[in-house]
Amino acid sequence: MRELLGYLEHEDFPARFNIAPTQPILVVVSGDRQERGSNLPDRRALLVRWGFTPAWVKDPKEFPLLINARAETVIGKASFRAAMRHRRILIPASGFYEWHRPSKESGEKSQAYWIRPRHGGVIAFAGLMETWSSADGSEVDTAAILTTSANRTMRPIHDRMPVVIKPEDFAHWLDCKTQEPREVLDLMGPVQEDFFEAIPVSERVNKVANMGPELQVAITIEPPAKPSKKPDPSDGQLSLL
């Protein structure tokens, strides 16, 4: 991650396989200065709470948990407007989980998928950060992941997907000093069709207490059971004629 994202200082952070909202996530932000003699960009890594809280909120307990922000409307939303202008971040990940939840009429079960880059490795989601301050002066750093409409690969599973920022666009996205929100709109579309692959995984991922690498092991999806066929009264074997 250090090689990809170019941040200089952070203690080693253990691998995690099932991160849930309200838990800490690792994010990368633009720094304040460039290290002398370094070719790496000036960036910092820190832990923040996954669940965005705008600075103007008085009581977070009475405010909905904002784990995502829609790219199509984020510039105009009061909750995200300031962060979109001043606190854009990168959220490194090796993939994400998504559920396909079919209609009840289909007879299919909900199915979890591990969505990962087809070629592996670490990627960076677009994110926003805000520091919420309580009346007693304590502060909490919070973040949300930007989402966009799903591409054709993802659409059979879900109609939304995270915004992926390409390495060549990291600096552009993180530059909140000279790049206004309208100047990064082109970075917030769906990633190319063949970027991700979807791997069906066990429903054990739905329980936060389960957090080992076995959660990402592929399973075989059982075909939906066919409804039993009722005898046809017109069948010749049941006819007296």
Image (tube, rainbow, N blue to C red):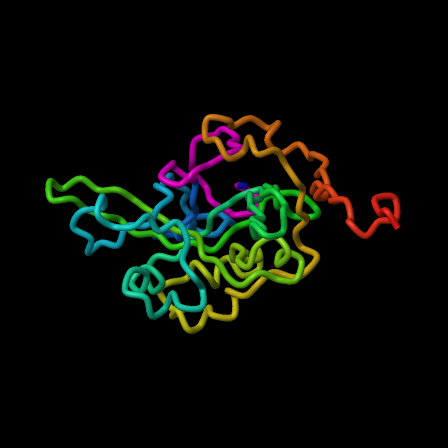
**Magenta stretch: helix, strand or loop mostly:** loop
Q: Is residue 22 magenta?
A: yes
Q: Nearer the viewer, residue 236 or 77?
A: 236
Q: Residue at x 52, y 48 (%)?
A: 5
Q: Is residue 57 magenta?
A: no
**Horizontally, is 144 left or right of 137 in the view?**
right
Count the numbered circles shown. Answer: 0
**Horizontally, is 217 left or right of 11 in the view?**
right
Q: Residue furthest left?
A: 136
| Span colored in magenta | 2-25
Of the 4 image quadrants, the one containing the N terminus is: top right
Q: Residue at x 48, y 58 (%)?
A: 147
Q: Residue furthest front?
A: 241
Residue 37 in picture, x, y percent from top left: 47, 47
Residue 31 in picture, x, y percent from top left: 37, 51
Q: Quadrant of residue 20?
A: top left
Q: Is residue 161 above or below residue 185?
A: above
Residue 135 in picture, x, y percent from top left: 11, 44
**Horizontally, is 142 left or right of 184 in the view?**
left
Q: Nearer the viewer, residue 217 or 137?
A: 217
Q: Nearer the viewer, residue 144 or 89?
A: 144
Q: Nearer the viewer, residue 227 or 241?
A: 241
Q: Residue at x 37, y 52 (%)?
A: 33
